[in-house]
Amino acid sequence: MLDKVGALTADRIARAIVAEGWPVGMHLGTELELMERFTVSRAGLREAIRILEYQGVVEMRRGRSGGLRVSAPDGSGIVASAVRYLTFRRVRPEHLLEARRIIELSLIPLVVDRMNNENARQLQQYLDQEVAGQPPSSPGNASKGFHTLLGALTGNPALKLFTHVLESLVHMRFYALHLSSAEAPEVHGFHVRVGEALIDRDLPRALAEFEKTLEHTKRYYIDVDERS
């Protein structure tokens, strides 16, 4: 019963935050004020706050200026939960390839269309680090990965999130355990060729290079799956 009350109260608080325009830092009230506002017991409110704090929506501060305040969620909890869920569902290589083909190929035209000096600078900086053998991402850390960067460069938060989930899953399922130091430069080489085409705003070349990346990925996934 407490879980249900907490979940319902968490939803009501979240809706109130959305209605206010998600004002980060805004004071929502003390524990007693919130109990009265949402007509809920102390235990029910604390369960709701626990849920919302886990989601990064709010933060309960103690002291004289304490109370519940609106936070800015960074999405990391959502990504981690999605990766755990898909791992539990035993996502297959063919499932990953289908998802990457549908989602990531759609990024390429958007990145080309929205390429500007700042986006080109970010992408070139990443490629320079790849060439130097110091990629920003690493096994177990896809938040600064090449594909997540492409999602960010579209300017579409939803595409960035979906791409981050896919790249995190790939890192955990394949690269973190199986990518050797000899294979890493080959992967980085694909990134460089795709990235250079994007910076040049050459859509046909960028799509062709990304298709090659997916084909290489397909062979790699199958090989790793057979060895597992």
Image (cartoon, rainbow, N blue to C red):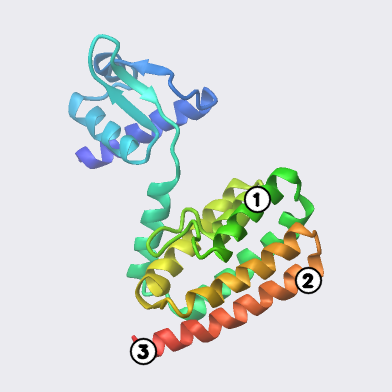
Labels 2 & 3 near each other (Cβ < 8 A)? no
Q: Quadrant of residue 1?
A: top left
Q: CA distance from mark 2 to mark 3?
A: 33 Å
x and y percentages locating residue 96 in the rendered image: 50, 73
x and y percentages locating residue 94 in the rendered image: 51, 80
Observer-nearest of 179 and 98: 179
User: Residue at the spot x=61%, y=60% of the render?
Assistant: 127
Labels 2 & 1 near each other (Cβ < 8 A)? no
| Residue 9 position (above or below residue 106) | above
Which amino acid, mark 1? Leu
- Label number found at residue 6: none
Residue under label 3:
227
Residue under label 1:
153
Closer to the chain start, of discs 2 and 3, is: 2
User: Residue at the spot x=43%, y=18% of the render?
Assistant: 26
Q: CA distance from mark 2 to mark 1?
A: 18 Å
User: Residue at the spot x=68%, y=76% of the render?
Assistant: 211
Q: Residues within 10 Å of mark 1 (few under 14, many from 20)?
A: many
Closer to the chain start, of discs 1 and 3, is: 1
Which amino acid, mark 2? Arg
Q: Quadrant of residue 61?
A: top left
Residue under label 2:
205
Q: Residue placed farthest to the top in the image?
A: 64
Which quarter shows the C terminus? bottom left
Q: Residues within 10 Å of mark 3 (few under 14, many from 20)?
A: few
Observer-nearest of 33 and 97: 97
Which amino acid, mark 3? Arg
